[in-house]
Image (spheres, rainbow, N blue to C red):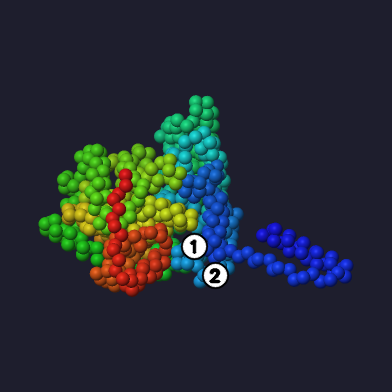
Amino acid sequence: MIWIGRLLGLGLAAMALSACNHAAPPPPAAQLPVLTIKPRDHLNRIFERYWENRLALNPSQASAVGDRRFDAHLEDSASPGYLADSLALERGALAELASLPADKLETAERLSYEIFKAGREAAIQGYVYPAELLPVNQVAGVPQMFAQMGTGFGIQRFDTAKDYDDWLSRIDDFLTWKDQAIANMREGIRRGYTLPRVIVQRSLPPLAAWSQDRADNPFYRPLRNFSTGVNAADRERLGARLTAAIKMKVLPAYRELHDFMRNEYMPVARSSAGLSLLPMGVDWYAFLVKRETTTTMTPDQVHVLGLSEVERVRGRLLAAMSQTGFSGNLNAFFGFLARDPRFYFTSEDELLNAYRDLKPRVAAAATNLFAYLPAADFEIRTMEDVRRGSLPAAYYEPARPDRRHPAVLYVDTSDLSGRPRFEVPGMYLQAAVPGEHLQRTLQFERRDLPRFRRYGDVPPFREGWVFYAEGLGDELGIFADPYARAGMLIGELRRALRVVVDTGINAKGWSRQQGIDYLQSQIPIAEAEAIAEVERCMALPGQVLGPAVGELKFRQIRAKAQASLGYRFDVRAFHTELLKDGAMPLELLELKMNGWIKTVQTSPPVPAPQPVPPQS
């Protein structure tokens, strides 16, 4: 564009000089071509510019998607500067998008446009509410993320000497975050934004554990597991530096955070449970409901939905119980499942092999429901000791984009008394195929998608798909055992109960005890487990809503497609359309699928996509 301006400037200067010399007027000059950018190209430039700026602002996200340019940094996500820059990024991207003639875009580009627009609008609205004043809880946040990074699992890599040097720099950034988090909590005290006192109490033990100078502290793990990519000289140098950084920086930082929360913050923390009792709390929770479900549902609507789902799933559980031949009520059935030794594994190998035995069975059956399966495979491994108890019993970790580490389904083989056989089929379907591995890998393999979509995550879509996929167990022949079907339904009942508790606590004014009592009235659950469920809803309002709402949305879309298409409905073509564009807000997914239904209705019948066998 600069050379065009210079050319125009030279032309004007020549005309002015000619006029001054009283020369004959020059012949009309040929009009310079007007360079235009196609709307599609303009849109892609907006996407790429936004993604680049987002990664620079959020180094941990860059690490998570395999971009190592920013590994030496950690975002100070609690600081006013970070919040201002983030808001400016979102507003700038949305303003650029508004200048684009959306009606000139093709269907595929228009979908990216709408997904991007919805994401930016939701992000901007979120900055209205001061989440930065509540930066610590017992479930998730920067302290937990940083501790996991320090183990070498997840997004932080410890493969080379540079990785260790980058980590040492990130430690300094964590100290900056810690100082800002404490300052923010003091500001929250002043403005009336504090955590529930019980959440502060639950936050103290992990902070204390991470501050202890013990050999099993997770931050020491990279010192015990140097990779072959680090030579002997670097091991000695880095070992000394990292040991000093842990002792003099990391452990004291966690100790300071722990002591602040125990001594200064907990005495003034609130006694109430729900978010709605905070300033702007009613509107804040209503926003979280929309964000966490990507729908326009209100808290009251979600609460009613949860109650109705509880009754529906209890009815299905009664039917499953009847199929087993058990006589009695649901509570007695739950007790029978919990006590009978035949439902439990006798060794870690037996549990691990139960997952491994499912892999070929599901792969063979999946071609009846899916025309396209991921090219990339996954491994099944025993979960490492350091992560047991902090993750689900079956936890899926996607392959790193740099392809240095494959996708893995980790199985917690500890505590065999809490690992019933009837839960394994459903958990496998959730985490592997056709659940998270299938959805996330197909999305990652779509190299034509903009990076914000290829690497992006829309939790209610992903989590909704995971549990919809579990429900395909009957069609896959995995739930022929009625006990396995009952295990799936028990999980579904728990998700519905969480919806009721979350909306009850955060919108209906329920106390913590009301939430505990409700859970224990609906399902036999140990008091400690009920407490943990309720307190999660207090610590992370709205987060449990997405899985249940998403699962139901997938089922509703399928039911509509089957009813509308009749004999034209092909489940493989349906699943192809559901997944081919990756994760997106549920309302946009529904609009897309409505369009697909109309297209199929008005098109001549065509052969369905042929099944593609799974690739190893």
Measuring from the top left, give residue 291's x and y in whole percent: 44, 63
Give the spatial CA distance, label 2 vs label 1: 15 Å
Query: Label 2 is placed on what type of residue?
Result: Pro
Q: Is residue 26 visible?
A: yes
Residue density around tag 2, few if under 14, some if 14–19, many if 20 or more, within 10 Å: few
Determine contact: label 2, label 1, CB under 8 Å: no
Picture layout, residue 203 above or below residue 239:
below
- Identity of the residue drawn at 24% across and 63% down: 313
On residue 116, the disc is 1
Instruction: State left or right for residue 296 relative to residue 94.
Output: left
Residue density around tag 1, few if under 14, some if 14–19, many if 20 or more, within 10 Å: some
Q: Residue furthest right?
A: 21
- Identity of the residue drawn at 45% across and 56% down: 448
Query: Label 1 is placed on what type of residue?
Result: Phe
Measuring from the top left, give residue 301's x and y in whole percent: 36, 70
Q: Is residue 285 visible?
A: no
On residue 101, the disc is 2
- Of label 2 and label 1, which has the lower sequence position? 2
Q: Nearer the viewer, residue 451 or 550?
A: 451
- Identity of the residue drawn at 41% across and 52% down: 445
Measuring from the top left, give residue 240's x and y in whole percent: 52, 29
Circle nearer the viewer, 2 or 1: 2
- Give the quadrant of residue 273: bottom left
Q: Secondary structure at mark 1?
A: helix
Q: Secondary structure at mark 2?
A: loop
Measuring from the top left, give residue 457's x and y in whole percent: 43, 56
Instruction: State left or right for residue 489 relative to residue 65.
Output: left
On residue 253, the disc is none
Picture layout, residue 71 above or below residue 220:
below
State which quarter of the image contains the C terminus.
top left
